[in-house]
């Protein structure tokens, strides 16, 4: 049985990934809600710095780890002059600092797996940038660069490192938009539809297979041809 750690497990994408790996032993981390499916769950506010004690509790009893899947993030809509230093620190801690802490803690266990995987769910905005989301876009771009750099660093091991950068995913974020705003957004999309979270999960599952062992350092664009 595979051991899978899903960080940020209760959002739309995290839930879909959890369901995709339902036959594996799943460890989940989230701030408030419990996952919909069975897992060894840990509550942790990822906008705050995590520590070694948190990591010891999460990884206790594991002899190996097959995949670290890091999904947390939240969009922040602000003109740059309205962004506070606290806003920046929060986004940085969530997207970069704690990601690195999880990687450092997971890596020894990932190296004991036949096919260790690090997968970061980033965003289309980390590729092309977004007006009024400059800080969020910057952090997602930093995640993409971390993935590319770490893939080279770990190339001689059995651990691959990749990112999935979805476009507009149907779920809680799109539901916050009015019907008019949703239609305006749909009109921009070549396929005239939002991405399903299950599509993201299916791609993540493929990256975890042995067949993908030569795929590393990639940022997979999953946006229906919106940006190519």
Image: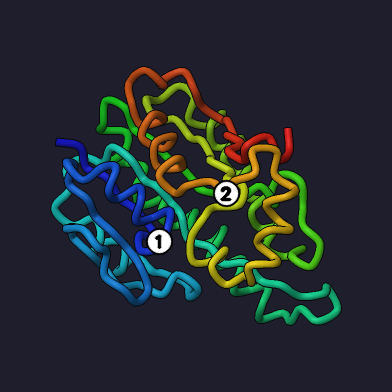
Up-down relation of residue 113 to residue 181 (above or below): above
Task: Say the numbered circle drawn on residue 57.
Answer: none
Pick whichever of labels 2 and 1 is earlier in the sequence.
Answer: 1
Q: Is residue 55 left or right of residue 194?
A: left
- What residue is drawn where x is 35% and y is 47%? 17
Label 1: how many Cα within 10 Å (few below 14, some 14–19, many 20+): many
Secondary structure of the residue carrying tag 2 is loop
Front tag of 2 and 1: 2
Q: Quadrant of residue 75?
A: bottom right
Q: Is residue 142 left or right of residue 59?
A: right
- What residue is drawn where x is 69% and y is 67%? 180
Secondary structure of the residue carrying tag 1 is loop
Residue underneath mark 2: 194
Name the residue nearer the viewer: 165 or 191.
Answer: 191
Q: Position of residue 192 (x, y in %)?
A: 65, 44
Label 2: how many Cα within 10 Å (few below 14, some 14–19, many 20+): some
Up-down relation of residue 59 to residue 112 (above or below): below
Q: Position of residue 172 (x, y in %)?
A: 49, 66
- What residue is drawn where x is 44% and y is 49%? 197
Name the residue nearer the viewer: 57 or 193.
Answer: 193
Q: Position of residue 220 (x, y in %)?
A: 57, 34
Q: Quadrant of the N terminus?
A: top left
Q: How many marks?
A: 2
Q: Coloured how?
A: rainbow
* Tag 2–tag 1 contact (CB < 8 Å): no
Name the residue nearer the viewer: 119 or 169.
Answer: 169
Q: CA distance from mark 2 to mark 1?
A: 21 Å
Q: Position of residue 43 (x, y in %)?
A: 30, 72
Task: Say the numbered circle drawn on residue 8.
Answer: 1
Q: Quadrant of the C terminus?
A: top right
- What residue is drawn where x is 40% and y is 44%? 198
């Amino acid at each position: 049985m595979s051991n899978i750690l899903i960080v940020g497990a209760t959002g739309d994408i995290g839930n879909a990934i959890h369901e995709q790996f339902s036959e594996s032993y799943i460890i989940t981390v989230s701030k408030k809600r419990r996952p919909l499916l069975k897992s060894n769950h840990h509550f942790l506010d990822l906008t705050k710095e995590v520590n070694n004690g948190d990591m010891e509790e999460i990884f206790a009893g594991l002899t190996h780890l097959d995949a670290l899947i890091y999904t947390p993030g939240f969009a922040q809509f602000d003109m740059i002059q309205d962004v506070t230093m606290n806003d920046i620190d929060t986004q940085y801690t969530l997207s970069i600092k704690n990601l690195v802490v999880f990687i450092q803690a997971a890596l020894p266990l990932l190296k004991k797996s036949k096919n260790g995987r690090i997968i970061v769910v980033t965003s289309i905005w980390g590729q092309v940038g977004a007006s009024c989301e400059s800080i969020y876009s910057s952090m997602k771009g930093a995640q993409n660069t971390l993935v590319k750099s770490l893939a080279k660093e770990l190339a001689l091991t059995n651990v691959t490192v990749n990112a999935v950068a979805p476009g507009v995913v149907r779920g809680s974020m799109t539901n916050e938009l009015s019907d008019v705003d949703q239609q305006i957004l749909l009109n921009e999309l070549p396929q005239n539809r939002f991405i399903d979270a299950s599509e993201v999960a299916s791609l993540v599952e493929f990256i975890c297979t042995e067949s993908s062992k030569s795929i590393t350092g990639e940022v997979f664009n999953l946006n229906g041809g919106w940006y190519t």
